[in-house]
Image: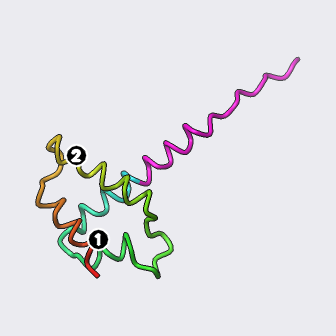
């Protein structure tokens, strides 16, 4: 029986899915801890956090945050608290 030919993997789709997953994870986590600016800063910019966001990921998170605020999924006050937390130090 002949082997089935493997489909080529679209690496661009994999990267996009990974970026979307990271963005959604951080956005959900940041909305949970938005009342504590120090915790927001630790998640996003703390040099000792090996899972901190790089500039591209941070821009993706902020873009998605603004989109969700404009749609009405997230309150603008939550967005302001997250941005204050990112700029905490």
Horizontal and vertical percent for residue 18? 50, 48
Q: Nearer the viewer, residue 61 or 26?
A: 61
Q: Where is mark 1, residue-wise? A: 86
Residue 17 drawn in magenta:
yes
Which circle, 2 or 1, is nearer the viewer? 1
Give the SS element for disc 1: helix
Q: Quadrant of the N terminus?
A: top right
- Spatial CA distance of label 2 from label 1 is 18 Å
Q: Nearer the viewer, residue 48 or 55?
A: 55
Q: Is residue 62 left or right of residue 9?
A: left
At label 2, counting other C-alpha atoms closer than 10 Å, the crowd grade (few under 14, some 14-19, many 20 or more) is some
Residue 7 drawn in magenta:
yes
Magenta segment: 1-22
Horizontal and vertical percent for residue 32? 24, 64
Q: Quadrant of the C terminus?
A: bottom left
Is the residue under label 1 in contact with that under label 2 (CB below 8 Å)?
A: no
Q: Which is more N-terminal, label 1 or label 2?
A: 2
Horizontal and vertical percent for residue 5? 78, 23
Q: Is residue 5 left or right of residue 78?
A: right
Q: Where is mark 2, residue-wise? A: 68
Vertical relation: 56 (above or below) 14? below
Q: Nearer the viewer, residue 66 or 75?
A: 66
Horizontal and vertical percent for residue 65? 26, 52
Task: Determine which quarter of the picture holds residue 42.
Answer: bottom left
Give the SS element for disc 2: helix
């Amino acid at each position: 029986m002949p082997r089935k030919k493997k489909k080529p993997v679209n690496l661009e789709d994999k990267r996009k899915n990974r970026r979307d997953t990271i963005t959604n994870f951080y956005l959900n986590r940041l909305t949970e801890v938005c009342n504590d600016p120090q915790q927001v800063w630790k998640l996003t910019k703390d040099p000792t956090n090996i899972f901190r966001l790089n500039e591209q990921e941070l821009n993706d998170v902020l873009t998605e945050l603004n989109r969700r605020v404009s749609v009405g999924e997230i309150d603008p006050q939550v967005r302001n608290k997250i941005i204050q937390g990112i700029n905490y130090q």
